[in-house]
Image: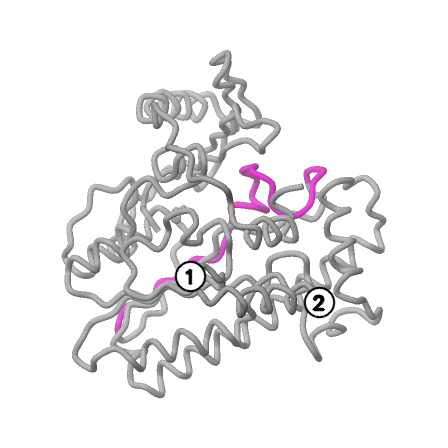
Amino acid sequence: MTGEYPDTAVGSDYRLATDTIASTLSEHGFATGGFHSNPFISRAYGFDHGFDEFDDDLHFGKHKLIALAQRALDKLRNRHYARAEEINERSLSWIDSVEDDEPFFLWNHYMDTHGPYEPPGEYEQLYHDEGLSGRDAQSLYRRAIKDPDSITEEEQELLIALYDAEIRYNDKRIGEFLEELRRRDLLERSLLIFTADHGDAFGEHGYYEHPRYLHDEITHVPLMVRPPGGADDEVSIPASTLDIAATIEESVSAGSDHEGASLLESLEEDRTVFMQARGEDDASHVRRYALRTADGACFCERDQETEAISFSDCTSRSLRSELEGHVEIRIGKENGEDVADSGDVDEEIDRRLEALGYKE
């Protein structure tokens, strides 16, 4: 959403610390709408900045009794996020409210493939025969996070089957959304970008879901760019989610000084893509970095307290040197001061973050 690395995009309290694509496009006359159900990118963390319409599926500012009733219902039905059908309905309603001659930017962020994996209806047993209640699914998911060694081979297969079913459900709902754009004569006139913020791991490196590591299971995500009128090229050169902001801004001639490159232009064959992550809460002083080329990779961790840097799995000495140079640049660009404390986090955000495996 920002085209920047995490060390400058968000503060130490995860609040947005820079402008987003929405802010830029709003300044260029676009209506802007965002629809999702992820507490970490909610208005509580400043991600509504630049949006004319921002529906994060939370209840701030609503009538207190209605909000309390909704929370009680959510707990009763073990609900942690809005389904893709709801996101589609809300965002299409907003599209229909935009003036016919007004350009718009829409961001839909779907949570269905996020754990705990609870595929709905006929999708629940699409890839396995065992029935599983919502609470059992959540219990299995949380145990995979807390005690990955306890997960049996059968349980691992069940988790993957449930994950695949969620993907299948989400795929269908996104297809329905695209058909609605086509029906409104918008699809062929729009720049469409489809990607993911992360993948999930299933024990490949001794962990499940998506802790803040940079292995392929977490970072190798789908990325499809469809310019107006369509295209059918497949690009094998490494790309980055940082490229998304640059791509959108170039498409509207907004100019950009982001780290990424426009995906509407030809990329250099020998391109290097860098990645970055902050350590988990019990290792918040750790920064992880990695790079990828078409032929190799390199990983390292930096301890902010001691400034010690340890490298691992580097496929060549030259890649290690390149990553060392990148880390040196990032150290110089890190936020030097903590963002001011935003106060108590709303109880609803606390509940959802815990249910989604983000906090204990």
Tag in front: 2 or 1: 1
Left of 233 or right of it: where is 360?
right
Q: Magenta span covers which residues? A: 205-228
Residue at figure coordinates x 43%, y 38% from the top left:
293
Left of 313 or right of it: where is 13?
left
Left of 112 or right of it: where is 131?
right
Q: Is residue 281 magenta?
A: no
Above or below, 59 against 322 in this view is below
The kind of secondary structure element at disc 2 is: helix
Q: Disc 2 designates what residue?
A: 76
Q: Residue furthest bottom?
A: 183
Q: Is residue 211 magenta?
A: yes
Q: Residue furthest front?
A: 65
Write down the quadrant of residue 22 in the picture: bottom left
Q: Work out whether residue 239 can be spotted.
A: no
Q: Work out whether residue 352 can be spotted.
A: yes
Where is residue 234 shown, x and y percent of the image?
A: 39, 61
Q: Which mark is residue 299?
A: none
Near-viewer residue (236 or 162): 162
What is the three-letter code of the residue carrying label 1?
Answer: Gly
Where is residue 20 shown, x and y percent of the image?
A: 29, 50
Count neighbours of disc 2 (C-alpha within 10 A) and say few if under 14, some if 14 to 19, many if 20 or more: few
Q: Disc 1 designates what residue?
A: 61
The kind of secondary structure element at disc 1 is: loop
What is the three-letter code of the residue carrying label 2?
Answer: Leu
User: Are the residues at dot 2 and dot 1 in contact (C-beta closer than 8 Å)?
Assistant: no
Write down the quadrant of residue 120 in the picture: bottom right
Q: Quadrant of the C terminus?
A: top right
Write down the quadrant of residue 312 in the picture: top right
